[in-house]
Each structure stands twice: as structure tokens, then as C-alpha cells.
Amino acid sequence: MGTVTATVTVEEGGAAGGTGPVRLHCTDHGGDGPPLLLLHGLAGHSGEWEALAARFAATHRVVAFDARGSGASTRRPGDVTRAAHVRDVLAVADRFGLAGEDTVLVGQSMGGLTALLAAAAHPEVCRALVLIEAGPTGPSPRLPEQIGDWLDTWPVPFPDADAAEAFFGGGPAGRAWAAGLVPGPGGLHPRVDRDVMVATVQENAQRHFWDEWDEVRCPVLVVRGENGSMKPVEADRMRARHPGTRIGVIPGAGHDAHLDNTAAVHAEMAAFLARIQRIQA
């Protein structure tokens, strides 16, 4: 089976401010074997995973989706809480028949936090967790301001893809971020809105997620970029509280480790997945 796109609809409503429905744009990369469900980071898009998905297609079923507020999913959802993002994981897993003992949740940055929370609250939906530059540390009071300031630096509209790639640092990461833009008046425009992204990180500003980390029972691989934003002390603390957690450091990689050095991330993940397959066999 080749790559297929689909839409998963999540009905919203209630006290959290949801207005619904929220439509989630999903990409099923196909492949045979245990499923991998891939969750991208803040202001990103599911296309970031294409290079990694291609490497896993021979051994795993690979599905990715655009988070609410990002990519081709509903751009201005009423509810952007962590709980809403976790509900989206459950809805996508159910739609593609992934929820179960074979599925591995893989998330980078904010997508990693969503994966962590899903595994903590719903252990029945996954057998393992891969967190790329993601962990439970907080609170981070200045994060909403930092995200807003970062988005304000984007020279929108970008005149063309080359300019966008250069702005985002070039290389595979720059190309992936540029690929998340869409044509509009005067050039290329983002598919995210500043206020939605700032609202999405409000919980991170106010609290930590160590209690949820303590609820995770499945095997975990934590992947740090050598030059990323995740501090070694956070990964070490995660392992101390969850013995058996494997930590991988990706040489030369930054926060977008899955883009900066896809081969090394694939190698870390493949070794981890082979190990848990042997243990759980």
C-alpha cells in the first residue's frame, strides 16, 4: 500500500471551550509490522516525518497526523489543551486500528509531551514510547512569550521556498519547515496562527508533568539532540524515576533531531524497538 491521506473528525464541546468539530489531517504511510504513530512538534506538520517514515516502512506500519491548529488540520480549534491533544491521539489510533498492545507512540517536542500524556492516561493504547527532545519539565513561565516572539520573527510572507529554507536554517530541517508553508498573497504563508500556538503552550507555562511521567509503565526511549534544547539533567531524571528508560544522544543534532540526523534517530529507534520486541516476545 502506498501513502494515503485521510481526515479524522473529533467532535468538541463542553467546559474546555471546544466548539467542534475538529478535523485532523492524517497520512498513512503504509508498511507492514507493528504500528508507529508519529506526533510532530509545535507549529510543525506531519510531513516532517516523511524521511523517518520511509526508513521504517519496510518493518512497521507508519501513521502521522497534523495536530489541531497546525498543517492541514483545523486551524483555529476551540480547545488546545493537552487533554484535547490526547483525545486526538486516541481518535486517530482508533480510526486506523492502531490502539493496542503493538503500537509505539513517537513524538517530538510538544508532540512528545502529548505522547507521554497519552501513554500515562491510556496505557492500553501503546506498548512503548519514543520521546524526541521532549520531557515533563516545567513550569516554564516565559514560554508563551518566547513562542510569540519566535513567530513574530518570521518574515511573512516568505518570497519563495529558498528564502524560507534559509530562514529556518537550511538543510533537512529548513526544507521541512519550508514545506509546511502554503502559497498566498505575496508569497508563502504559515499554516498556524500566533495566538493559537501561544495558547497551546499555556499549560507548560503553569505546571510540570512529572506526576504523569510517573504513571508511564511502558518501555521508553528518550532521544536528545547533542545541540538540542532538552537538558541532559532532564533525561537523567526521567531515567532515575523510570528505571530502564533508554537515552540516546544524536550527534550534531539540534531540537529537530529527527530532521537533522534522520539516520541516527532511525538507528536508535530500531535498536530500541528490536530490544522490546525480544523482551515482550
Image (cartoon, helix red, strand yellow):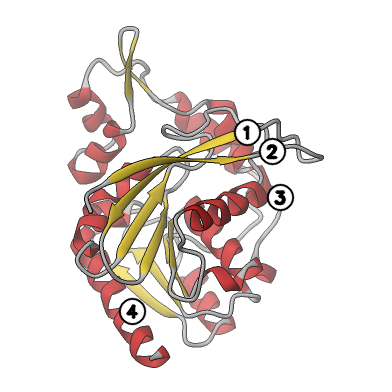
Residue count near mark 4 (Cα–Cα under 10 Å), binned few <14, some 14–19, many ≥20: some
Mark 1 lies on residue: 21
Residue 95 picture location, percent across and down: 49, 52
Q: Amino acid at mark 2?
A: Glu
Residue 23 picture location, percent across and down: 53, 35
What mark, if any, has residue 12 been given in the picture? 2
Distance from the alpha carbon under mark 2 to that under mark 1:
5 Å
Q: Amino acid at mark 4?
A: Phe
Q: Earlier in the sequence, mark 2 or mark 1?
A: 2
Is 189 on the left-hand or right-hand side of 117?
left
Q: Earlier in the sequence, mark 3 or mark 1?
A: 1
* CB within 8 Å, label 2 to label 1: yes
Mark 3 lies on residue: 206
Task: Please name which of the two marks, 4 or 2, marks the residue nearer to the observer.
Answer: 2
* CB within 8 Å, label 2 to label 3: no
Task: Please name which of the two marks, 4 or 1, marks the residue nearer to the observer.
Answer: 1
Residue count near mark 1 (Cα–Cα under 10 Å), binned few <14, some 14–19, many ≥20: some
Q: Earlier in the sequence, mark 2 or mark 3?
A: 2
Distance from the alpha carbon under mark 3 to that under mark 1:
27 Å
Dot 2: what SS? loop
Residue 223 picture location, percent across and down: 37, 67
| Residue 273 occupies quadrant | bottom left
Figure check: 19 above or below 41: above
Distance from the alpha carbon under mark 4 to that under mark 2:
36 Å
